[in-house]
Image (cartoon, helix red, strand yellow):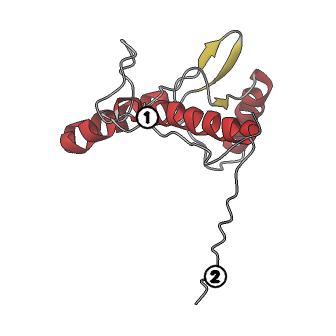
Amino acid sequence: MAKGGTQTQETIAPEFLETGIQQGINQGRDIATYQDTPMPLYGQQVASFSPADEAVFQGNQLAAGAFGMPTTGGQQYMPQEQTMGGIRGYSARPMVDEMMKRFEAERPAQADYRASFGLDPITGEAGSRALSNQPVELELQGGGSRGK
């Protein structure tokens, strides 16, 4: 009895595509380490009111008071504005810093675990669980001749 032959079909990615995929994966690995490193907020996140806006508010308060309507009595509800590079605004940094401190105080093991994936912001050293410290390197290899 005759046996039938076997056929194998193999798909080989072109070298330029394989190289692009490897570069994309490596870039993702690098970015993943930075993604797990908390970045403090610098500068203002929200613009503050202009002097003209503040004058309008004050005028409204005076008009309301003149007609016996309720006013704020001069109370300020906004945080202290900051000026950076001539731009006035409000920063969320104090609130975010306080949230991070509270998280680290109330959940130290979870904070340490999360930090182990990121970078030390002073030394730049990758944490123990960062992808760059993992023992397995990803390498794509074509499985056949490329006509070289």
Label of residue 137 in the image: none
Residue 76 visible in the snapshot: no
Q: In the orientation shown, which residue stands out farthest toward the bottom?
A: 1
State the CA–CA distance, disc 2 to disc 1: 70 Å
Q: Amino acid at mark 1?
A: Val
Q: In the orientation shown, which residue stands out farthest toward the top?
A: 85
Report x, y in % for residue 55.
76, 27
Q: How many marks?
A: 2
Report x, y in % for residue 121.
39, 18
User: Does 116 sit above or below residue 123?
Assistant: below
Horizontal side, residue 44 vs residue 120: left or right: right
Query: Which element type, helix, strand or loop, lies under badge 1?
Result: helix
Label of residue 4 in the image: 2
Residue 143 visible in the snapshot: yes
Report x, y in % for residue 140.
56, 42
**Residue in front for this viewpoint, 106 or 75:** 106
Query: Which element type, helix, strand or loop, lies under badge 2?
Result: loop
Quadrant in which the N terminus is drawn: bottom right
Residue placed at 58% from the left, 39% from the top? 25
Q: In the orientation shown, which residue stands out farthest toward the front?
A: 1
Report x, y in % for residue 22.
61, 37
Residue underneath mark 1:
96
**Residue in front for this viewpoint, 124 or 78:** 124
Q: Amino acid at mark 2?
A: Gly
Horizontal side, residue 71 vs residue 54: left or right: left
Residue placed at 50% from the left, 36% from the top? 29
Residue 66 occupies quadrant = top right
**Residue in front for this viewpoint, 108 or 47:** 108
Residue placed at 26% from the left, 40% from the top? 113
Q: Are marks 2 and 1 in contact (CB under 8 Å)?
A: no
**In this view, the mark in front (2 or 1):** 2
